Amino acid sequence: MNSYETIFLIKDDITEEQRNAVVDTIKQYLNENASITGEENIGKKKLAYEIRRYEYAYYYLIYFNGKDSIIPGLEKNYRTNEDILKYITVKKERMD
């Protein structure tokens, strides 16, 4: 298993319930296919550049361990959710 971190940006004009539903959908996928080792709700931040006419977004970071094969499914969840503006998942280096 590998260690990963994923961060995604959620639109700032949706309700808190909708935002929580977006996060829960991502966490549910990860819980079914990997093990979450940490998470951080970074909060609302100004974007470095405008994305789809949005100047602000909510940032959410999740650390998890899993197989390489779950990443395409995770990214499909991101792409199909219209409330997610941007995302990235990176494999963390091992410090053995």
Image: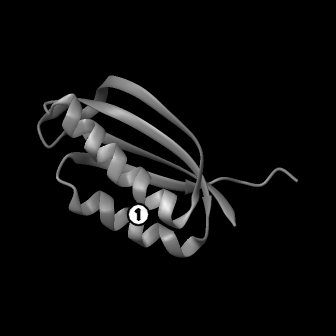
| Of residues 49 and 90, the one drawn nearer to the viewer in this rendering | 90
* Residue assigned mark 1: 74
Single out the residue that lies furthest toward the bottom: 69
What residue lies at 77% left-to-right and 55% top-to-bottom?
94
* Residue 64 in the image: above or below residue 39: below
Instruction: Give the quarter of the image for residue 75.
Output: bottom left
In the image, what residue type sits under mark 1?
Leu
What residue lies at 16% left-to-right and 30% top-to-bottom?
15
Judged left or right of residue 9, residue 42 is right
Residue 78 x/y as whole percent: 31, 57
What residue lies at 38% left-to-right and 53% top-to-bottom?
26
Residue 93 x/y as whole percent: 72, 54
Instruction: Give the quarter of the image for residue 51.
Output: top left
Residue 3 x/y as whole percent: 66, 56
Residue 89 x/y as whole percent: 48, 55
What residue lies at 43% left-to-right and 30% top-to-bottom?
41
Instruction: Give the quarter of the image for residue 35.
Output: bottom right
* Residue 90 in the image: above or below residue 16: below
Quadrant into which the N terminus falls:
bottom right
| Of residues 30 and 89, the one drawn nearer to the viewer in this rendering | 30
Judged left or right of residue 77, residue 14 is left
Task: Tell me how many marks there are.
Answer: 1
* Residue 16 in the image: above or below residue 83: above
What's the image's color scheme? one colour
Within 10 Å of disc 1 (Cα), the crowding (few <14, some 14-19, many 20+) is some
| Of residues 23 and 87, the one drawn nearer to the viewer in this rendering | 23
**Label 1: which secondary element:** helix
